[in-house]
């Protein structure tokens, strides 16, 4: 930004010296620098805004995919008996999985299936 502002000042200074000279030249240079700086900031804000919007769109797309994933291939078997130790209750859950993705989906499905699991996790 500084280089762009400096270039704008040099250009404005050359033009202003030819036309005005003196104090008016200095004012023209300051105005050119401020304008160049503001254009750079505006461009940066637009880039940041675009990057944030892109990231939000990607996050929403991932969330939609996860929400719409079909978990019909995951079947949890839950033990009827529980193990109680002091104030903690443990219950076994098992299911057959065949991929890393299926593990992720199975764990998510198990956690979502029980308020107790959600609080414990």
Image: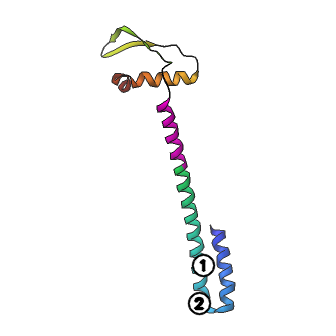
Quadrant where the C terminus is found in the figure: top left
The stretch in magenta equals 54-72
What is the distance, in whole Å, between disc 2 and disc 1 at their CAs? Answer: 12 Å
Find the residue positioned furthest to the top: 81
In x, y percent, where is residue 35? 57, 75
Residue 45 appears in which quarter of the rendering? Answer: bottom right
The residue identified by callout 2 is: 24
Q: Answer yes or no: is residue 121 visible.
A: no
Tell me: residue 116, above or below residue 20. Answer: above
Left or right: where 92 falls relative to 37? left
Tell me: residue 48, above or below residue 34. Answer: above
Secondary element at image label 2: helix
Left or right: where 85 falls relative to 76? left
Do the residues bearing badges 2 and 1 touch, measured as CB atoms within 8 Å? no
Magenta stretch contains residue 14: no
Secondary element at image label 1: helix
Residue at 60%, 85% in the rendered image: 26
Q: Nearer the viewer, residue 63 or 45?
A: 63
The residue identified by callout 1 is: 32
């Amino acid at each position: 930004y500084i280089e762009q502002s400096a270039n704008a000042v040099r250009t404005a200074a050359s033009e202003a010296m030819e036309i005005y000279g003196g104090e008016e030249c200095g004012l023209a240079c300051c105005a050119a620098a401020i304008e160049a700086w503001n254009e750079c900031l505006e461009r940066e804000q637009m880039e940041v805004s675009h990057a944030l919007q892109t990231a939000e769109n990607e996050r929403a797309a991932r969330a939609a995919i996860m929400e719409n994933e079909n978990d019909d291939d995951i079947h949890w078997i839950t033990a009827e008996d529980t193990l109680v130790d002091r104030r903690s209750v443990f219950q076994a859950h098992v299911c057959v999985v065949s991929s890393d993705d299926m593990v992720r989906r199975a764990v998510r499905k198990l956690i979502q299936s029980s308020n107790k699991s959600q609080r414990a996790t």
